[in-house]
Amino acid sequence: MTTTSVVRVERPEPGIAVVTLDRPESLNSLGRASMEQLPLVLWELAEDDDVSVVILTGAGKGFCAGADLAYLAQCVQDPDTDMGEIMREAVQTALALAALPQVTIAAVNGPAAGAGWGLALGCDLRIAGPTAKFGATFVRMGLGPDYGVAQTLPRIIGRERAMELLSTGRIIDASEALRLGAVLAIEDDPLAAALELARSIAAAPGRALRSLKRTLDLSSDRGIATVIGEVEFDAQVELFDHPDFLAGAATWLTKHGAVVR
């Protein structure tokens, strides 16, 4: 497994990978090295069938402060820089995260701003620490949302609340994020809590977890008849036709007082 100068990857337990943004001196802001290396790590994990859950967190006191503003300023001030190319490179991280077939958990140990909040919102589940803060602060710099925030934030908290946060750039604390439904829980040690949750999730067959996530993604913008008759139907037929189903069913029924013959 790849570990780079600004991204650490660890496997604390079977089925679980922890990806740590490792630029604590800048609250793990995303500079050029991060934008190059983090997608490579995520793409490699996407191909790893032994990993069922990916936890994303930050080293030190921050989760991710968003883009490295010094790097962006340097790009903007260079007349030879093509900002379209810079953006195409920058968004590869968000695209790689969105494409992960594993269940993803953000352990938000500190500030998550701009693209940093985009990374947290791009995960399936989020656990915040007491000092976590969240801000879609793009508008304060004369920018619009990126890293998928234009979709993920209103989908998670509703359009009206998302509009207020996006248009003011207001920063919220962990308690408000919990009230809005932007995080699952607040824990003193968000990484430890994420590992506990990941352990519970990883107990299920990885194949079933991948299918579950794909089914939810495909169902998000389909009519109910299509979800029932096509999306869920196709996924379930494929899962039935696999040894994991009979093995899992036998274990479940035996545990609950029945025996599969």
Image: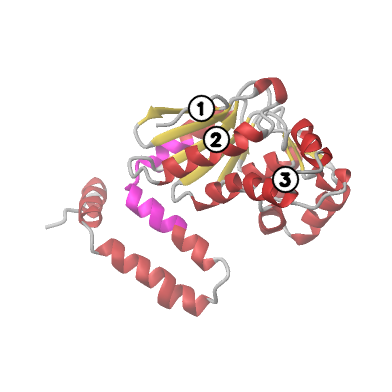
Residue position marked by numbered label 2 in the rendering: 37
**Residue that sits furthest to the front in the current view:** 80
The amino acid type found where label 3 is placed reads: Arg
Instruction: Name which residue lies at 44% across and 51% down.
Output: 101
The amino acid type found where label 1 is placed reads: Thr
Q: Are marks 3 and 1 in contact (CB under 8 Å)?
A: no
Does residue 198 belong to the magenta stretch? yes
Eyeballing the image, is 223 above or below 178? below
Q: Earlier in the sequence, mark 3 or mark 2?
A: 2
| Residue 206: image location, x then y, percent | 34, 47
| Residue 125: image location, x then y, percent | 56, 45
Q: Select label 3 or label 1 by which is in front.
A: 1
The amino acid type found where label 2 is placed reads: Gln
Q: Select label 3 or label 2 by which is in front.
A: 2
- Quarter where residue 26 is shown: top right
237 or 32: nearer the eye?
32
Tell me the distance, in whole angstroms, between the alpha carbons under discs 3 and 2.
34 Å
Side of 36 relative to 214 (left or right): right
Residue position marked by numbered label 3 in the rendering: 179
Which segment is the magenta one? 197-213
Residue position marked by numbered label 1 in the rendering: 4
Does residue 209 belong to the magenta stretch? yes
